[in-house]
Image (spheres, rainbow, N blue to C red):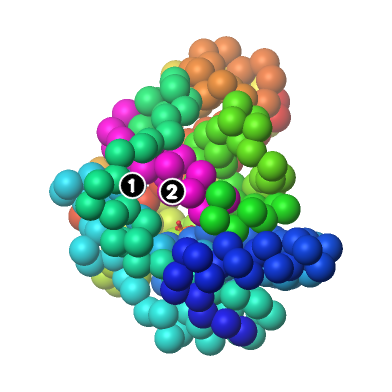
């Protein structure tokens, strides 16, 4: 396995592979890899000749008061995990190469970026769309793999690839969870013991919503009210939003008639966690 630090070397590698008719599967991450990331790498490994894992903590997608500086970084451990999963290349560019001092260009996916998480993290999805476009241009992967854990992100990236005619297929893979249901996340490492216990309430609230819908409840407001009641029982939990939306355009749904995306963001202490499920009535 190679670790490539330079953009030029990365795109030279990809060109060489394509000349040899080798397909490239790409898994973009911010590192601090866990089993959720590894599930994407395994899928990429099974479907492509070469697997490239991107590790880049992208400053453009963090707000000024967010955790960019303290975000967990551990290249040595990440490299070990990537090697075990049969990764061919880790692409690990530095910030100055990705965003030189005179950097001017951004990618914005309108509307889809302004709701749900986008409402509370202005500029976040602009940062995501911009870095993913750059990475796709540098690596030219045949397929790029994203997690359903970040459902809004996957939807935005798919729309961006369609609108900009980018020559890559986007695949969204299921959320990998801890035994108790908590969605795996690099940010779970921030949680203290009692907070970790409270954090399971995101999944419990989503499961409760799914059960209510399966039992015939079609009223989003009522379901959200019940989810709020459950979450607010946890001392360390502070709800940022709970939304029930259409999984295509992310518009709010009042009466549930078709498949819906139920998404939420909850602060557990100072740690902001997100989760979601898709439910059919
Ligand atoms: P991140 O390093 O958090 O930016 O995540 C990199 C990729 O891994 C994104 O496409 C995420 O959606 C995906 N991912 C993160 N956590 C999980 C999880 N628990 N299950 C599946 N995919 C995940």
Quadrant of the image for the N terminus? Answer: bottom right
Q: Is the magenta stretch mostly helix, strand or loop?
A: helix
Horizontal and vertical percent position of residue 155:
57, 35
Q: Determine whether, in the image, residue 160 is placed left or right of residue 186.
A: right
Q: Residue furthest left?
A: 65
* Residues at discs 1 and 2 in contact (Cβ within 8 Å): yes
Residue 222's place in the image compared with 271, above or below, is above
Horizontal and vertical percent position of residue 38:
60, 70
Q: Mark 1 points at which residue?
A: 61
Q: Is residue 48 visible?
A: no
Give the residue displayed 37% in from the left and 57% down from the top: 98
The front one of 204 and 148 is 148
Give the residue displayed 78% in from the left and 63% down from the top: 19
Horizontal and vertical percent position of residue 102:
25, 47
Quadrant of the image for the C terminus? Answer: top right
Give the foreground label among 1 and 2.
2
Per the rendering, the mark at residue 38 is none
Q: Determine whether, in the image, residue 136 is placed left or right of residue 121.
A: right
Q: Mark 2 points at which residue?
A: 131
Q: What segment carries the magenta color? A: 119-136
Q: Determine whether, in the image, residue 198 is placed left or right of residue 166.
A: left
The front one of 177 and 248 is 248
Q: How crowded is mark 1: few (under 14 residues within 10 Å), some or many (20 or more)?
A: many
Real-space Cα separation, disc 1 to disc 2, in angstroms: 9 Å
């Amino acid at each position: 396995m190679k670790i490539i630090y330079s953009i030029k070397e990365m795109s030279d590698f990809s060109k060489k592979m394509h000349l040899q008719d080798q397909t490239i599967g790409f898994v973009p991450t911010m590192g601090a890899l866990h089993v959720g990331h590894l599930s994407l790498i395994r899928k990429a490994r099974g479907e492509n000749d070469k697997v490239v894992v991107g590790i880049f903590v992208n400053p453009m997608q963090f707000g000024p008061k967010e955790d960019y500086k303290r975000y967990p970084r551990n290249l040595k451990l990440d490299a070990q995990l990537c090697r075990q999963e049969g990764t061919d290349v880790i692409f690990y560019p530095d910030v100055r190469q990705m965003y030189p001092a005179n950097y001017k260009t951004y990618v914005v996916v309108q509307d889809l970026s302004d709701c749900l998480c986008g409402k509370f993290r202005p500029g976040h999805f602009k940062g995501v769309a911009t870095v993913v476009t750059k990475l796709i241009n540098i690596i030219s992967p045949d397929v790029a793999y994203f997690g359903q854990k970040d459902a809004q992100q996957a939807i935005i990236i798919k729309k961006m690839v369609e609108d900009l005619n980018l020559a890559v297929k986007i695949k969204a893979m299921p959320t990998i969870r801890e035994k108790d249901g908590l969605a795996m996340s690099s940010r779970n490492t921030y949680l203290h013991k009692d907070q970790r216990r409270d954090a399971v309430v995101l999944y419990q609230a989503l499961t409760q919503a799914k059960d209510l819908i399966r039992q015939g409840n079609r009223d989003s407001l009522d379901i959200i009210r019940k989810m709020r009641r459950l979450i607010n029982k946890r001392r360390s939990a502070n709800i940022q939003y709970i939304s029930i939306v259409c999984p295509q355009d992310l518009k709010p749904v009042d009466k549930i008639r078709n498949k819906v995306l139920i998404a939420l963001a909850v602060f557990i202490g100072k740690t902001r966690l997100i989760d979601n499920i898709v439910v059919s009535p």
